[in-house]
């Protein structure tokens, strides 16, 4: 049976028996080079998703299930959006989806929702796909009455996106580019260290992005004892706690990023262990993408 969303015919595909309904692609568009925005009509997920949670997505019935952090949602329209980077076979398949296609898997929300309270001044730092991920966090923090500072970074201005969205939910937006094409050349570590050393009030830091960026933020805020939260989505694979690939030592105890997180106190994460394991699947993924 053909399904339509906003008048667009949906292509049939194998579908998981235990999903409440079909999830249909509404829009898939490039944001900046190598980063895509995927918007899906999935009312059951949109009704319950919270900042910090993720979904499991499968591009076709032959593809693998991959976890993606949710970047936005519209509960009334039943829409959920994710920003993803094309790095391997599965994400390249996602990058070829067209409106109307039915996803065989789009399940969630998964993971624990990020704790959102009124803390005072909160710095939200995002890089790469993390720029999209901090948007719902900044929005929720603002709704709680916090003063929100959003800090985004990229190699150049053409790799930055959603500045208008972040400006709408932030009291201040800081921008850094490595080539100095927009904002300051000074990146996360130096800029944040300078802020804290000058006595600027920052009650909490939330960092979302690649593992090395989150590690840098953790080490920058540690001497100032500013509680820092990081999302360990980048190390997840299965997303349900069954594969064990996202195990991480937090506070001396083994945790799984997907079921115990994905958000953790950055100062309790064993970064040496995490960074040593982060490229374990790089070889097989590269080989798969080439084939």
Image: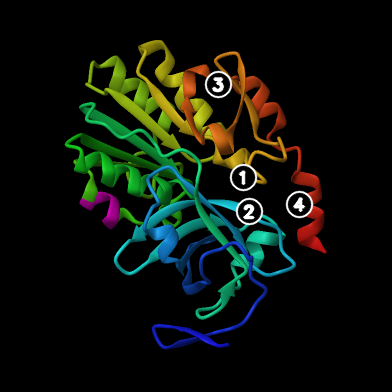
Q: Are marks 2 and 1 in contact (CB under 8 Å)?
A: yes
Q: Name the spot of residue 257 as percent of width and height, x first.
A: 58, 34
Q: Which mark is residue 239?
A: 1
- Closest to the camera, between mark 2 and mark 1, is 1
- Closest to the camera, between mark 4 and mark 1, is 1
* Quadrant in the picture for residue 236: top right
Asked whether the viewer can see residue 128, the reply is no
- Closest to the camera, between mark 3 and mark 4, is 3
| Residue 88 located left or right of residue 143 | right
Q: Which residues make up the magenta segment?
A: 164-168
Q: Mark 2 points at which residue?
A: 66
Q: Are marks 2 and 3 in contact (CB under 8 Å)?
A: no
Could you give the CA–CA distance between mark 2 and mark 1, rounded to whole angstroms?
7 Å
Which residue is at 38% across, 43% downward? Answer: 152
- Closest to the camera, between mark 2 and mark 3, is 2
Q: How busy is the neighbourhood of tag 2: few (under 14 within 10 Å), some, or many (20 plus)?
A: some
Q: Are marks 3 and 4 in contact (CB under 8 Å)?
A: no
Q: Mark 3 points at which residue?
A: 269
Quadrant housing the N terminus? bottom right
């Amino acid at each position: 049976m053909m399904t339509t969303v906003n008048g667009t015919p949906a292509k049939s595909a194998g579908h998981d028996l235990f999903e409440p309904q079909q999830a249909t692609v509404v829009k898939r568009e490039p944001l900046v080079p190598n980063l895509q925005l995927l918007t899906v009509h999935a009312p059951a997920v949109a009704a319950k998703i919270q900042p910090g949670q993720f979904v499991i997505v499968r591009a076709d019935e032959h593809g693998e299930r991959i976890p993606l952090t949710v970047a936005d949602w519209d509960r009334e329209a039943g829409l959920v959006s994710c920003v993803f980077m094309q790095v391997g076979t599965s994400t390249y398949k996602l990058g070829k989806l067209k409106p109307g296609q039915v996803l065989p898997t789009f399940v969630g929300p998964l993971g624990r929702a990020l704790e959102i309270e009124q803390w005072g001044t909160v710095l939200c730092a995002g890089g790469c796909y993390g720029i999209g991920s901090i948007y719902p966090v900044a929005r929720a923090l603002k709704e709680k009455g916090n003063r929100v500072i959003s800090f985004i970074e990229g190699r150049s201005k053409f790799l930055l996106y959603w500045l208008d969205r972040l400006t709408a939910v932030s009291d201040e937006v800081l921008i850094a580019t490595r080539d100095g094409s927009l904002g300051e050349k000074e990146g996360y570590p130096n800029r944040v260290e300078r802020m804290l050393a000058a006595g600027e009030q920052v009650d909490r830091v939330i960092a979302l992005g690649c593992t090395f960026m989150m590690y840098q933020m953790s080490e920058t805020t540690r001497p100032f004892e500013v509680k820092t939260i990081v999302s360990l989505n980048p190390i997840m694979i299965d997303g349900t706690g069954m594969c064990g690939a996202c195990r991480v030592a937090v506070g001396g105890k083994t945790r799984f990023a997907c079921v115990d997180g994905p958000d953790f106190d950055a100062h309790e994460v064993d970064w040496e262990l995490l960074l040593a394991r982060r490229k374990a699947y790089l070889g097989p993924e590269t080989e798969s993408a080439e084939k």
